Image (tube, grey):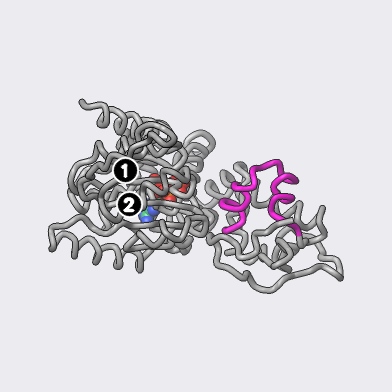
Amino acid sequence: MSADEAALAAAEAAYVESRGVVGGEADGDDRAVEAALRPTSLAEVIGQERVREQLSLVLEAARARERAPDHVLLSGPPGLGKTTLAMIIAAEMSTPLRLTSGPAITHAGDLAAILSGMNDGDVLFVDEIHRMSRPAEEMLYMAMEDFRVDVVIGKGPGATAIPLEIPPFTLVGATTRAGLLPGPLRDRFGFTAHLEFYEVGELDQIVRRSAGLLGVDLTDEGAAEIASRSRGTPRIANRLLRRVRDFAQVRADGVVTLGVAHQALDLYEVDESGLDRLDRAVLDVLCRRFAGGPVGVSTLAVAVGEERETVEEVAEPFLVRCGFLARTPRGRVATPAAWQHLGLTAPANAPFGSPPAVSAGEPGLFDTDE
Ligand SMILES: Nc1ncnc2c1ncn2[C@@H]1O[C@H](COP(=O)(O)OP(=O)(O)OP(=O)(O)O)[C@@H](O)[C@H]1O
């Protein structure tokens, strides 16, 4: 194995270890189970119909031309299937998938090592691509467009750039914040898709499929209950299914009925709208401590003891989508539905804000914050 291949293998192993992205026993630990539940072809993917159709066209055309498909950018909140789609793109092109993530590429040299270890037609998946370092990002522009990078040797006036040819490859970038990508990088993706939260009916199908693979006995009502509390997110649907299965095994006769699902999800503090502890904490702080807002997202994050990114990328998109939170030029505002959901009465002067100015999952137009 060459040094470049070793660098690529090490980057990949770190990513796989952190995310549990390959195979695994359907009954092993949670990460292995998640990997085992991933659809492996576009035909198996449930929901995201438009993205599926568009992507299938891109891949079919590339296959017909016997060329690597255009670079693909997938954006959307966590757990909606970006990694799954990247794996499917490689599988549908019958080519290996190389995996890494933005935070792992701290220097341009890291990227050069990864790129030079690739073979013709490989698919390179870069998760959290918005978190890559600026010099690496600039190197990526050239690699994406010209399949070439300049490796700089030395420093200062004596530095020399050595051009390095890279075999044609397809970059699949995933991001929860497409708006944070610099324009020149975004423009180099030939196909971009924003993944939307799933409808309850689609999650219902996902829960049934996963139950079949895991050998979980569940009724129609049990599946529907899990689906309706899954925050529009397949990863959460699968996770709740596993927790409800535990409950059914230990506290019932093993069958996931409506009653079992209900009791288990109450125990795990997932409410009827699918809000979890963090979602409710954000709404609670917004209403009780800040009288419904407007309040900046950083302040909200400090108040709930979380990172700003977690509030902004995980809790907020779903709260906006449910109509509980609105983004306004002056900050985040609780809607009447939020007050009602918490069983509180809004003060007469509560600012309700207008409907969200930007779609859920997209970065705010008004992220200036406090
Ligand atoms: N369309 C789908 N149909 C069935 N299962 C799905 C679908 N999308 C995702 N899943 C399941 O949800 C889980 C999470 O998906 P995945 O890891 O691809 O999400 P992600 O968007 O990459 O998340 P993150 O942003 O956190 O990396 C997978 O285990 C997969 O089984």
**Point 13% across, 58% down: residue:** 66
Q: What residue type is labelled 2?
A: Met
Mark 2 → mark 1, Cα distance in angstroms:
8 Å
Q: Return the residue at label 2.
A: 142
**Front label number (2 vs 1):** 1
Q: Residues within 10 Å of mark 2 (few under 14, many from 20)?
A: some
Quarter of the picture containing the C terminus is bottom right
182 sits to left or right of 364? left
**Point 47% across, 46% down: residue:** 134
Indicate the secondary structure of the residue bearing disc 1: strand
The quadrant holding residue 62 is bottom left
Indicate the secondary structure of the residue bearing disc 2: helix
Exactly how many numbered labels are in the figure? 2
**Point 29% across, 56% down: residue:** 145
Q: Which amino acid does label 1 sit on?
A: Asp
Give the magenta range: 295-317
Quarter of the picture containing the N terminus is top left
Q: Residues within 10 Å of mark 1 (few under 14, many from 20)?
A: some
Ligand 1 under 8 Å from disc 1 Cβ: no
Q: Name the disc covering residue 150, or none.
A: 1
15 drawn magenta: no
**Point 19% across, 52% down: residue:** 93
In the image as oriented, which residue stretches furthest toward the bottom?
Answer: 354
**Residue 218 seen in the current view:** no
216 sits to left or right of 181? left
Provide residue 241's location: percent of width, then percent of height: 46, 45
Magenta span dominant secondary structure? helix
Residue placed most toward the observer, 104 or 176? 104
